Image (cartoon, grey):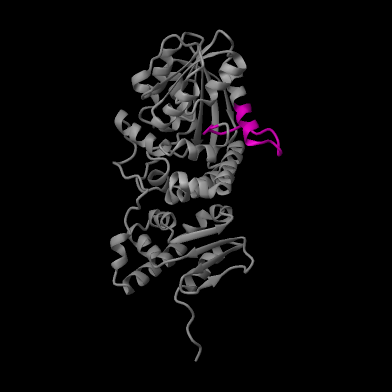
Amino acid sequence: MRAPGPELQPLVDRLSRRLPGVAVTAYDGSRSGPADASTTIAIRTPAAFARVLRAPRGLGLARAWVAGDIEISGDIAPVADHETDLHDPAVAAVVLTTAVRVTARRGFRDLVAAGATASEYRAARPGRHTVGRDRAELDFHYGLTADFYALLLGPSMTYSGAMFAGPGDSLEAAQARKHARIGEKLELGPHSTVLDIGCGWGSFLDHAATAYGSAGIGFTASREQFSYASRRFSDRAGIEIGYGDYRQLLPRPGITAAAGVGMYEHVGQRRSPAFFSLVRRSLPAGGRYLNQAITRRETGPRRLRANAFAQRYVFPNGQLLPLSRQLADLDRAGFRVLSTESFGESYARTTGAWLDNLERNWDACVAAAGLQRARAWRAYLAGSRRRFEDGTIDVTQVLAEAR
């Protein structure tokens, strides 16, 4: 009589068939997929199944990955490329039934420790934006040290989509090109005073001052970014850095142009009209505003899920809106839209470059952010790159003029 194989072999075989070229292994000796695979998914402990059982809609798998119960070695791209295949009902059913069987045989004792991980953001339902809540969420997203972001982003310290020109273009050159494009669209010059709403670590303000001789005002609601940018410009005349929420600091008189680069994603749909109204009240008639933001396809209203991976581990309360919503709210606020420019393919390369930086500097990133946060960012960047590549999300610069 033939001896039975490892218990998890049917699950491992099912997963391997959905992930071409990827090897899948499990702690009981199960294995499937190419022997020379460049990517391997390893189910390392039975606790992974308890996490799935505790939160079966995807959050459990995310927790298992972040906690190290599931490991991905090698290139993570093939896993991200087939993420939707892993959500197939047939696959989900096999995963869930296996989770019930494994966890039950262990007396369900693993369920006690299978809740939220230490690095998880736990807050009220997403979609509500108050000053206090937004600050807390920004501090979670940007509160990792400047050392971590320097490793991730490279010397430009720019956390927004770059504009690549060719296959040999570097990330730094592409970020400089993006800053130059914004400066040209805003028609900056020596007599300009540009407001950077959500200025990050100050890279665009630095470019505006260096390339155009413009004065600059920037503010951020992230304490880490404020501290870094304040030090960066401590001995530079003509650049002012402030700390606070846009609802507290706008409207801002005395400016000639404004930009929001990668900030609008934090505003949310409910606050979008009021945000653009505050920007409009800051500008004189004819003053230009550029809004660079990630957009999603127009598929109707979309409810934010508190248990989504990005909400819990990277980008709490972040919301991507369709371009049409942005254009309508700008128009109602008193702007005339001059142009739109989308460059999602370049953002795919940007996130790919960030992922390369993270993996190349892995030990240092773990030391700066902790293992769980570093693992979460690895999955987040791989998934983001895939979504930009397949067009699920895009990035657009909208140039508008105050009427």
Q: Could you tell me how many numbered marks the image carries?
A: 0
Residue 280 locus on image (x, y percent): 43, 15
- Determine if the magenta segment contains residue 177: yes
Q: Along the line of sight, which residue is nearer the eye, 130 or 158?
A: 158
In this view, 316 is above or below 254: below
Q: What's the residue at 44%, 56% (across, down)?
A: 65
First to last magenta residue range = 157-178
> Can the viewer see residue 49?
yes
Give 119 or 265, whichever is nearer the viewer: 119
**Quadrant in which residue 388 is drawn:** top right
Is residue 212 depicted above or below 394 in this figure? Answer: above
Residue 182 screen position, x and y as percent: 58, 22
Q: Could you say which is closer to the camera, residue 363 or residue 204?
A: 363
Residue under the point 56% across and 45% down: 355
Does residue 40 sit above or below 400 in this rendering?
below
* Residue 101 location, quadrant: bottom left
Height in image: 270 above or below 73? above
Provide residue 54's location: percent of width, then percent of height: 32, 59
Q: Position of residue 49 (x, y in %)?
A: 38, 65
By secondary structure, the bulk of the magenta-drawn segment is best described as: loop
- Residue 297 in sight from this viewpoint: no
Residue 205 located within the stretch drawn in magenta: no
Which residue is the extreme one toward the front?
Answer: 235
